[in-house]
Image (cartoon, rainbow, N blue to C red):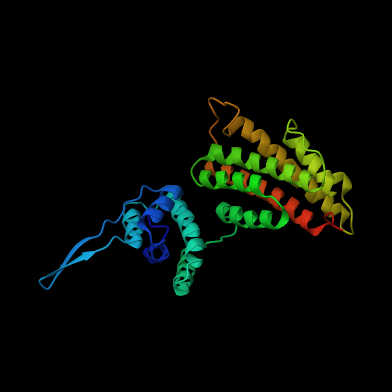
């Protein structure tokens, strides 16, 4: 099968890896790889011997060389590594911005992007920034997002479970933000309904010049949160579930996107200070 991520892209990813071999290995492991650390070594040239220090970029290339890039899961791990490495690289004082541009171009040529539309990891990153802007204390949501990141792209059950937890954390954050009482015994559908009512975006509160259209959108968006919660009970981690039903990885990613769609909508409405459609 043809490779799904070109050698050009893989080389560009290696060039924006952290300088520290240890840190690079940690991110590779987080992304789902078994790192092959570069240990440096002696180089013999024209009768002289030079000692080459270990390089993080070589660590990435060695690790990638041991992988099958015709496998979509391997590509997903590489993109996960690239997204985090690129964010770290961009903050370093001596970052060569041209490598970020080259990486972006190489990914585009391969049909990907660091912030590709529909990419759950990119959605997580964007939602984290939104939560920080909308909430005085986004710690609970940040915690769930970190757990969700760890579940991508391999653990479908954990993705579904974390998606449900993110909905719950966001609903509670909205209730706190609006001065409403949070009852820890409320289940997700109740929390979603209360949070929606607190922001004036419950389907029964829809208003504005596009009333019919807004009601239809809200009428489809809110039930998604219930479906994610029910899916978690059947196929997610948690509740001591045994004999968990097999669920395709795409369904896990869909649960993540659905959860983030609702959560982002709620925080955007909270920031705007007015109900949707008005």
Q: Residue furthest left?
A: 47
- x and y percentages locating residue 64 in the rendered image: 35, 55
Q: Give the residue at x 29% y 60%.
A: 54
For image coordinates 68% across by 53% down, the residue present is 131
Could one spot residue 156 in this view of the protein? yes
Number of marks in the image? 0
Rendered view: 99 above or below 134: below
At 31% from the left edge and 56% from the top edge, which residue is drawn?
Answer: 62
- Tell me residue 202's x, y (percent): 83, 45
Q: Is residue 109 left or right of residue 178?
A: left
User: Compared to 251, does 103 lie above or below?
Assistant: below
Nearer-the-camera pick, 134 or 205: 134
Residue drawn 41% across and 61% down? Answer: 17
Image location of residue 2, percent across then percent down? 38, 57
Q: Nearer the viewer, residue 173 or 231?
A: 173
In the rendered image, residue 169, in percent from the top left (x then y), is placed at 68, 42
Q: Is residue 30 above or below residue 129?
A: above
Give left or right: position of 250 versus 270. left
| The C terminus - image quarter | bottom right
């Amino acid at each position: 099968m043809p490779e799904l991520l070109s050698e050009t892209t893989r080389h560009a990813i290696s060039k924006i890896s952290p300088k520290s071999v240890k840190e690079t290995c940690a991110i590779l492991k987080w992304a789902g790889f078994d790192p092959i650390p570069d240990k440096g070594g002696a180089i013999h040239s024209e009768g002289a011997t030079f000692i080459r220090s270990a390089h993080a970029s070589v660590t990435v290339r060695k690790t990638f060389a041991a992988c099958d890039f015709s496998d979509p899961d391997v590509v997903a791990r590489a993109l996960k590594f690239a997204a985090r490495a690129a964010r770290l690289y961009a903050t370093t004082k001596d970052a060569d911005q041209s490598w970020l541009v080259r990486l972006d171009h190489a990914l585009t040529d391969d049909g990907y992007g660091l912030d590709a539309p529909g990419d759950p990891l990119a959605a997580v990153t964007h939602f984290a920034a939104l939560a920080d802007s909308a909430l005085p204390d986004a710690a609970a949501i940040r915690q769930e997002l970190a757990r969700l990141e760890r579940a991508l792209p391999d653990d479908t059950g954990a993705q579904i479970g974390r998606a449900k937890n993110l909905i719950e954390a966001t609903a509670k954050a909205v209730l706190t933000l609006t001065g409403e009482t949070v009852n820890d015994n409320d289940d997700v559908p109740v929390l979603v309904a209360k949070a929606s009512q607190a922001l004036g975006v419950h389907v029964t509160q829809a208003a504005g010049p596009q009333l019919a259209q807004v009601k239809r959108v809200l009428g489809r968006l809110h039930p998604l949160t219930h479906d994610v919660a029910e899916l978690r009970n059947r196929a997610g981690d948690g509740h001591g579930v045994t004999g968990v039903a097999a669920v395709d990885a795409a369904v896990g990613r869909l649960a993540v996107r659905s959860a983030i769609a609702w959560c982002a909508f709620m925080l955007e409405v909270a920031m705007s200070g007015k109900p949707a459609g008005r």
